[in-house]
Image (cartoon, grey):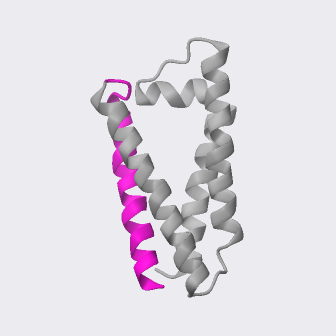
């Protein structure tokens, strides 16, 4: 996959989740087995959207990046970020926070990690 396509898809996914967790967290989180039972949990979901939206913006704004050192560093950073997502969401699943559809998150982050690593190796 070329850099532009990868970064467009990657950024789009992150922007969609950022918007969902900001505007409709009470609909999104129960799908993953997580209850939002007070204003603080609701705010933390919205707060998380800062980082998801930021990753989306970085990916979308840099989608015209050409192969080279900077692109390689970008894809390494995305690989690390997505790998952290694998670890954290697996932990949430193993300790019982994520149930039901929540187990899709480690698979999602694993797929993005593999794709990020593949883009990293291509540079």
Quadrant assignment, res 45: top right
Q: Position of residue 107 (x, y in %)?
A: 34, 50
Residue nearer the viewer, 89 or 27: 89
Q: Is residue 106 magenta?
A: yes
Query: In this rendering, does residue 19 appear at all?
Result: no
Residue 99 magenta-highlighted: yes
Residue 103 versus residue 82: which sits nearer the camera?
82
Residue 29 in the image: x percent, y percent?
Answer: 51, 28
Q: Is residue 97 left or right of residue 67?
A: left
Q: Can you give x and y, in whole percent of width and height, for residue 57 in the image?
A: 69, 59
Quadrant position of residue 82: bottom left
Residue 74 is situated, as x and y percent measured from the top left of the image, at 57, 71
User: Which residue is rendered at x = 39% and y = 39% of the image?
Assistant: 89
In the rendered structure, which segment of residues is drawn in magenta?
96-123
Task: Tell me the quarter of the picture where residue 93 sits.
Answer: top left
The residue located at (38%, 34%) in the rendering is: 102
| Image: 35 above or below 120 | above
């Amino acid at each position: 996959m070329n850099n532009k396509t990868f970064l467009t898809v990657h950024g789009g996914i992150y922007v969609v989740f950022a918007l969902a967790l900001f505007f409709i967290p009470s609909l999104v989180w129960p799908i993953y087995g997580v209850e939002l039972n007070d204003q603080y949990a609701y705010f933390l979901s919205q707060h998380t959207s800062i980082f998801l939206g930021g990753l989306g913006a970085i990916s979308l704004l840099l989608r015209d990046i050409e192969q080279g050192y900077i692109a390689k560093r970008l894809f390494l950073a995305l690989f690390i970020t997505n790998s952290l997502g694998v670890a954290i969401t697996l932990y949430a699943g193993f300790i019982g926070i994520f149930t039901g559809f929540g187990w899709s998150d480690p698979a999602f982050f694993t797929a993005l990690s593999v794709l990020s690593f593949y883009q990293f190796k291509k540079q």
